[in-house]
Amino acid sequence: MNALDMNCKYFGLLPLQLMENAGAALAREVRARAAGKRVAIVAGRGNNGGDAFVAARHLAGFEVTTYLLGRSRDIATDEAKRNWQILASLGSDLREVGEASDISLKESDLILDAIFGTGVHGQVKGLEAAAIDAINSSGRPVLAVDIPSGLGTNKVVSASATVTFHRPKTGMSGEVKVADIGIPPEAEFFVGLGDLWLVGKRRPESHKGESGRILVIGGGPYTGAPALTALAALRAGADVVTVATPRSAAGTVAGFSPNLIVRELSGDHLQPEDLDVLRDQIPRHDVVVMGMGLGRAPETHAALKEIMPLCRKAVIDADALQPDLPLKGIVTPHVGEFKRISSISLSTAGFRERIEPLKDYARKKGVVVLLKGKIDLVSNLITDGDGVRANTNGNAGMTVGGTGDVLAGVTAALYARTTALRAATAAAFVNGRAGDLVRDEKDFGMVATDLIEKIPEAMRL
């Protein structure tokens, strides 16, 4: 839900609008449930409290007392603070409390629990814990806002019922009413900043390698492609990137950057003779990304057939996208490559017409498919659900060679830190956003290395 809120904001549906809708839905439920006119709101300083502040404004004709746990100057969000200030301007009964004994609930006809939302975890202590105890010992009906406060922690409100927003939340029991607050289905279909947020940030105390070790297997007939992938993975946050490439390409790849570790393979293309080196390297890395610039020699095909089953996590692109190979993890085809691996032509289909064939293929093969195009599509595994996500950023300048290699590197770096579905979804967003940043500076005179330099900026929330 946090990610969905961020996506709504990214697409222009402001948090203040959603809060207004949530508060109005709460007020309707209070009117339907309250046996009398006396309503007590016990609110925290976050958006959960903000929803209740809106509800208080909508409850004309009721005697509403709002207890804020803490000081109003410490309200955490602009939206919640604005709605508190509106209540204050209207002369509402507002009380900032520092002790649970300051909360009087026993004469209330209904208590609105708005202390915590979905973001709380760990141990609930202090004033909030005491307030939860006061609610639970009041003997009065309790309506929880979104979830019972403290759900999943050591202190949980015993709610008579819960009004939850948009969708039910994990772990709730008892009477639950799902309220529509105006989040359109498109906010869950199109990719936004929230999908990038879900990947998570590097821990301040992290050590070398914890943010991902990536092995790139590519090159031979083409030398630039694996270097682009490797550099993109580094810019997307991977700690260590190794490029395993044939001898004929190794010097060129190493010359791209001293930040790359290069493991030289034999000859001028990948072949079974390289398997001993790769069997040693693959377990040392979190994700293996392969296919960029490999060519399609029969020996390369035979080697890939042996390599893929060895990988715990794999991103498969370009020349490694062949129909009789044991594809796994994330595959990143364009429509031509998708036809090659699936025998399904999508070249004349609109992006919505591509959804069902994409889902069917992903289910059959047990992979996540990131289908590149004007609108990128990312399929779910059958075990993760049956939806497809769409990414709409990016531009026509990204048809220049090498942008797909950059996408493969970003995908691999994110896959080291999260699930296949989240990695592919966020990577499509980052790659497209980087392309848009380049276009703003260079119009359509972009090259793939321009995208790489914009990746850090594209990953900012």
Image: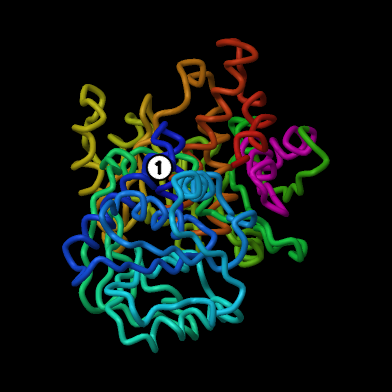
Q: Is residue 77 left or right of residue 355?
A: right
Q: Which residue occupies 67% across, 57% down?
A: 202
Measured as percent of width and height from the top left, residue 345 is found at 22, 31
Residue furthest to the left: 32
- The main secondary structure of the magenta stretch is helix
- Asked if 323 appears above or below 131 in the picture, the reply is above
Q: Nearer the viewer, residue 377 or 14?
A: 14
The image quadrant where one finds the N terminus is: bottom left
Q: Which residue occupies 51% across, 69% down?
A: 120
Residue furthest to the right: 258
Amino acid carrying label 1: it is Leu
Measured as percent of width and height from the top left, residue 193 is found at 49, 41
Q: Which residue occupies 22% across, 22% down?
A: 348
Looking at the rendering, which quadrant does residue 166 occupy?
Answer: bottom left
- Asked if 267 appears above or below 353 in the picture, the reply is below
**In magenta segment, residue 242:** yes
Q: Quick one: SS at disc 1?
A: loop
Q: Is residue 388 left or right of residue 234?
A: left
Q: Nearer the viewer, residue 23 or 372?
A: 23
Residue assigned mark 1: 321
Q: Note whether residue 424 is visible.
A: no
**In magenta segment, residue 373:** no
Measured as percent of width and height from the top left, residue 6 is found at 46, 44
Measured as percent of width and height from the top left, residue 249 is found at 69, 36
Q: How many numbered callouts?
A: 1
Q: Which residue occupies 33% across, 52% down?
A: 23
Q: Please report the bounds of the magenta region as a residue range.
A: 228-255
Q: Nearer the viewer, residue 211 or 393?
A: 393
